[in-house]
Image (spheres, rainbow, N blue to C red):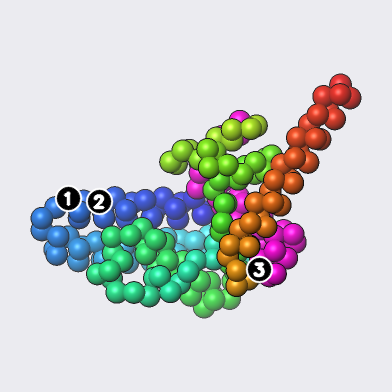
Amino acid sequence: KALELCREVDKINHIETNIRQNKKSKKLLNKYHNQTEQLINQSCNEYIDYLRKQKNNKSIMTVLELLDIKEFNKSKTTNSMHSMFVRGQLQKRLMEKLNWNGFNFMEVEPAFTSKVCPVCNNLSEKNRNGKIFKCVCCGYTDDADHVGGINIGRRATDEEIITICEEYEYNQHERHKALKILYKNRHEKFLNEQKKKVIHK
């Protein structure tokens, strides 16, 4: 379902591109905002319906990336050309609907979630090429948004990452630095375990 929400954002971004290329921007801009609202509401409602159909749905935790909401409270004329604005509006609406319907949710640190391999913990800028994720170390390949969703979900119960985020809550530089060190150590541990498996064979 998280991947479907990301694809809805892509649809909205496509509308945005058309606006940029068309001289009748005011008319298209109104259409853009209307379609944005419709897609956001539709996506959120579909997700809520999905949760309602699950057994023990009140125990399901929806994990979202922690976005800078201040960036999304600016005027539409300032932000309408930025996909982050749409993502922010989508997330705000989803949290409102989750809260209203009594479903649990939490936000987690989003840094590096679409650049770190969920298999070997290799964190590299080279892992992601547009919408495609391919780990330069182990070769794991997937949709980049799906990889981001996997890593975001795992962070909800990752005690080491939770501790780092709490310790450096107000210092993004140190928080990101600590996360890089953690993933580096985890990646080295993975490589050592692979070497041991080869030796034992």
Mark linked to residue 21: 1
- 77 versus 113 height, above or below: below
Residue nearest the viewer, comparing 81 with 176: 176
Magenta span of residues: 139-168
Q: Is residue 95 above or below residue 134?
A: below
Q: Which amino acid, mark 3?
A: Tyr
Q: In the rendered image, is residue 52 in sight?
A: no
How busy is the neighbourhood of tag 3: few (under 14 within 10 Å), some, or many (20 plus)?
A: some
Q: Is residue 119 left or right of residue 6?
A: right
Work out which quarter of the rendered image holds the C terminus and state it.
Answer: top right
Q: Position of residue 150 (x, y in %)?
A: 60, 50
Residue type at mark 1: give it: Gln
N-terminal label among 3 and 2: 2
Q: Residue at x 67, y 43 (%)?
A: 121
> In the figure, residue 118 lies in which quadrant?
top right
Question: Which of the numbered marks, if any, corresponds to residue 93?
Answer: none
* C-alpha separation, residue under disc 2 versus residue under disc 1: 7 Å
Secondary element at tag 2: helix
* Circle number at residue 168: 3
Would residue 142 be counted in the magenta stretch?
yes
Q: Earlier in the sequence, mark 3 or mark 1?
A: 1
Residue 58: x and y in percent read: 64, 69
Q: Is residue 169 left or right of residue 133?
A: right
Q: Secondary structure at mark 1?
A: helix
Tag 3–tag 2 contact (CB < 8 Å): no
| Disc 3 element | loop
Q: Mostly what secondary structure, the magenta segment?
A: helix
